[in-house]
Image (tube, helix red, strand yellow):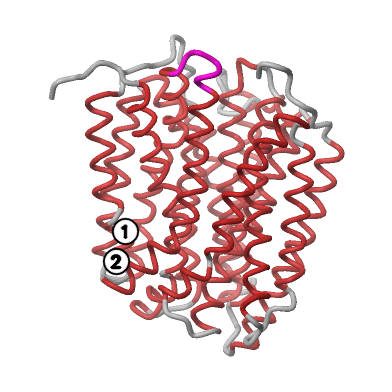
Amino acid sequence: MTRHPIRPHVVLLTCCLSLFIVMMDVTIINIVLPSIHRAFGGPLATLQWVVDAYSLVVASGLMLGGALADRFGRRRIFMTGLVMFSIGSVLCGLAWDAVTLVLARAVQGVGGAMLNPVALSIISSVFREPVARARAIGVWGAMSGVALGVGPLVGGVLTASVGWRAVFWVNVPIGLAAWTLSRLFIPESRAERPRPIDVPGQLTAALVQLCVIAGLIEWPRHGADGLVVALCVGAASSAIGFVVVERRVRAPMIDLASFRSLPLVSALLTAICVFAIFGGFLFLNTLYLQDVRGLTPLRAGLCTVPAAVGIVGGAVLSGRLLGRFGARVPLLVSAFGLATGLLVLLVVGPATPWAVVFSAYGLSGLGYGMANAPITNAAIGGLPPERSGVAAGMASTSRQIGASLGVAVSGSLIASATTAGAMVAASHTMWRLSLGLVGVMVVLACAAGMKRPPAGD
């Protein structure tokens, strides 16, 4: 295949396409969960694993994906990620039971872990002038909000017209287009001095996440039996092993000294809080709309439009506030939006007027949209400039961990609900827990000293 001259805007388009399918998958999967449950049956934990199998693999592989790209070539790893994500999507669409669907979602996660961090590195290597690079990254980031917003709508339309399997197949032509553009226009690049890959650190970190999430998901079914106890022991021993490994290895995946930076730690914890709230919000509200209110997937997707508008509007407003005031102000506005939305959700029941439901969705979306940019900014600002990539990777990993926790906890809370009223009551428990996380966000934003970025950053 003939290579073409470097065209920066085509490279940006290609990277945006990869981000689009990855982020759309976050919300499109939630809208079809009830349809999957009707097709395969099984306990509610099945739906939790359908969501979290992907998030866990992405969280475990983000840092590794970046390291592989630096060593073997960003374009090569990016194209491999597109292939893996597309193959995983095909397998999801062909799944014949819940187990194969969960495994296929894990394959998708392997591809997803190779895409976002590598795409950002590709953009940075192609757009070398600071202003052009900032604009390109802004466009790339805005695509995230667009993808999150259209996901439920696309999912509803495809499910209503073709079936739930189509929400996975739609990724394939987009992935193929992005792969072709990558082959033609993206130049190969790699780090001049790539860091060694910390395999023991990667494995122990992944085991910690797997054991914690699995324990939360399986607790309602198994209680404190042998499986859950083994998962708790596995999480604790893996966490200890991770600390030991990272202290002794020559080139650790994460330098433990990084956690001495209060702005970095605050940004990571804030990311976990925000995405735990939003992960639970997406999971519970798709069940509320379809199982409690009896809506079709298409109508349920339309009901999420206020959240999509809030996400996009919040992202735009956040960027402006971030440049003027630093990370603290947009994070506090984010906390206000999330808290207000959660308080409204606490009065939502099986027959609540739609105006109230939509206002809760819009406020929650606004709070979520406000948080992304300042989290990344605060994380990067918490480490020296030469380690900005590590900081961004840690922030992305924290987001995925938070989303996994949100789904695991919210699903466990409603696992025993057998009526619409019981499901709503259990959801209210999650909203109260989420309000506690918003309080943690406020404390972190006030305590971390998140200031306005220096001119020219």
> Residue at (62%, 86%) from the top-left corner?
350
Tell me the residue that label 2 is attached to.
165
Q: Name the spot of residue 254 as percent of width and height, x first.
A: 61, 28
- Which quadrant, please, contains the N terminus? top left
Q: Label 2 is placed on what type of residue?
A: Arg
Mark 2 crowdedness (10 Å alpha carbons): few <14, some 14-19, many ≥20: many
Q: Residue 132 colored magenta?
A: yes
Tell me the residue that label 1 is attached to.
168
Q: Considering the numbered disc 1 on the image, is that residue within a helix, a strand or a loop?
A: helix
Residue 457 image-quadrant placement: top right
Q: Is 220 situated left or right of 22 in this image? A: right
Residues shaded magenta: 127-133
Instruction: Mark yes or no: residue 230 visible.
Output: no
Instruction: Mark yes or no: residue 151 visible.
Output: yes
> Residue at (62%, 28%) from the top-left corner?
391
Q: Label 1 is placed on what type of residue?
A: Phe
Q: Considering the numbered disc 2 on the image, is that residue within a helix, a strand or a loop?
A: loop
* Residue 124 or residue 221, whichever sits in front: 124
| Labels 1 and 2 touching (C-beta < 8 A) | yes
Q: How many marks?
A: 2
Farthest residue in the left direction?
1
- Label 1, label 2: how many angstroms apart (C-alpha)? 6 Å
Q: Name the spot of residue 245 as percent of width and height, x first.
A: 60, 30
* Residue 150 or residue 451, whichever sits in front: 150
Farthest residue in the top direction?
192
Q: Is 273 situated left or right of 11 in this image? A: right
Determine which of the numbered discs, if any, sits on residue 69 in the image: none
Q: Name the spot of residue 235 as percent of width and height, x first.
A: 61, 51
* Residue 166 or residue 128, whichever sits in front: 128
